[in-house]
Image: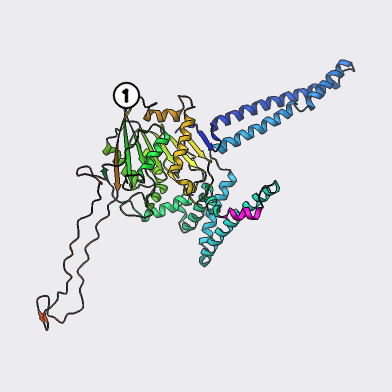
Amino acid sequence: MSGDRTVVHVTRGGTTTVEPDDLQAAAARVRAVAARLDGAGSDLAAASRELIGLPSHPDVAALGTALLGARTAWHAPHRLADELRELADALVHAAGTYAGAESAVARRVREGLGVAGGLAALSGPLALPLLASTGVAWVLDQVLQDWMHHVLRWAAGGREPVGATIDGLGTVPARMLDAPGAAGAAVYLAGALTVGLPWWVRTGDPVRDAARMAAALLPPSPVTVTAHLGGPPLPAVRGAADAVAAVAQTYGKGPVPLPPATVTVQRHDRADGTVSWVVTVPGTQTAALGGGVPTNSATNAHLVAGVPDAMTRGVLRAMEAAGVGRDDPVMLVGHSQGGMVAASVAATGAYTVRTVLTAGSPSVPHPVPPGVVHIALVNDKDGVVGADGEPDSARDADVVVVDSSTTASAVFGEHAVHGYVATAAALDAEMATWPADHEGRRALEDVLGTNGDGTVTATTRWTVSTPQEEPPVPAPVLGPPSPWPGPSGDGPFGPGPSTFLPPVTLPPPAVPAGSGVPGLSRGW
């Protein structure tokens, strides 16, 4: 990953592109100018002092008046220097804001939430009341903030504050659980869950520690990857919006349903004879902690904990089965959990990944290798992004797109994949204005080409599953002592019944229609 970063801020007014490193460099240059102005101010002061020892003369008096005016005017060097220093401070603050950096105070407060959660859990019978009272206080704090906001607007001619506050109560949960709010809640609950961990197994990150505890109880199952025939046609992916739209299609909500955990692999045969690939991965599709569908909550725990997970292994197997070459340029795309899987696949180094495009995804502890450009789409109202305990989960990305164009109205409502298609479209429009040698633009073009350039595409789909072992046939169940002599003995009413259950015949396992053809299943 490069040291540079590009931040695209999407608002209702359009997009703004900022290079935080450039802002830092500009601030340094502004401070250098301010230092020179300070020097000029010192020179003027020194010249004024020299005049004191000179004989009285009209020219000396005129020069003294000019020096005094230069030192006291609104544009005096020391005043201009102060203004430039304020400008430099604003540039540094803007660089930190666009880079998604938290203030030290905000980070300490969030870390304190983990301690508070642990203390609540240690309070014995008071634990649940304390947790509940914390939640109530959190809600009341949000309502109070809303009321104060409406009071200020009322003073400027706005609505009556009580009615406006009551009307906004329905959106309080959604606004509380935006990215920073969800991060705080995750840290607080994780602190309560991990309070009993010994110090030598802690990582300093309560959310990751909680995920490791869960992952230890939920070992990943063996993975099977099966070719899925049919499905809706997938248009050629030509940009970020097409890529996220392809992920939306893998959720199977279109006219032709797809099985859960279906990975789409699109091959791009370029006019110059080279081959590249786009691999799309869906997010969480079941809240189960196990079962045959690996896009589940157990995979989330494994990914946040940084341990092997079923979907990463499944995507690697699907890429192998699709024929992806080790040296072919690849673009990995995922929404939510799928973005974490995409980053995890890239981190293995098994393929030549050029771009990882994530949409609404928490971070994983494995950084992408050097040379891989990570493009992160983040809606700042999306609480799922903060589920890893970090409100700025795109902090390690090379290109960060922060979408502030929406208003939270339902809890996790801004997490929908279709909203991220619009965010990606804004990125495409902004990226078209970037220079041809911009790293993010080049990484996409290495896989997608430019303007189609005669590329022919072909799409295959692969369903990842974690088959569960058949439950064992129950052992024979012995009943109470029988009045009959035995299975073949005769009782007073004829042949006696057997004390053993009759044999159980299990039906063959059901195979869903369209799940694959013989010879194309690959196991891990």
In the rendered image, residue 165 lying in the magenta stretch gets the answer: yes
Name the residue rendered at 24%, 57% in the picture: 470
Q: Give the quadrant of the N terminus.
A: top left
In the image: residue 123, left or right of residue 334? right
Residue drawn where x is 65% and y is 29% of the image: 31
Q: Which residues are magenta?
A: 158-169
- SS for dot 1: loop
Can you give x and y, in whole percent of width and height, for residue 386 in the image?
Answer: 49, 47
Q: Is residue 398 visible?
A: no
For residue 503, side relative to residue 194 (left or right): left
Query: How many numbered badges does the structure rendering display?
Result: 1
- Against 193, is 259 above or below? above
Q: Amino acid at mark 1?
A: Ala
Provide residue 378's location: percent of width, then percent of height: 48, 41
Eyeballing the image, is 281 above or below 207?
Answer: above
| Quadrant for the C terminus in the image | top left
269, above or below 377, in the image: above
Which quadrant holds residue 130? bottom right
Residue indicated by mark 1: 271
Residue pushed farthest bottom?
492
* Residue 307 vertical position relative to residue 39 in the rendered view, above or below: below
Q: Is residue 305 left or right of residue 462?
A: right
Question: Is residue 182 in the magenta section?
Answer: no
Where does residue 421 sit, x and y in percent of width and height? Answer: 44, 39
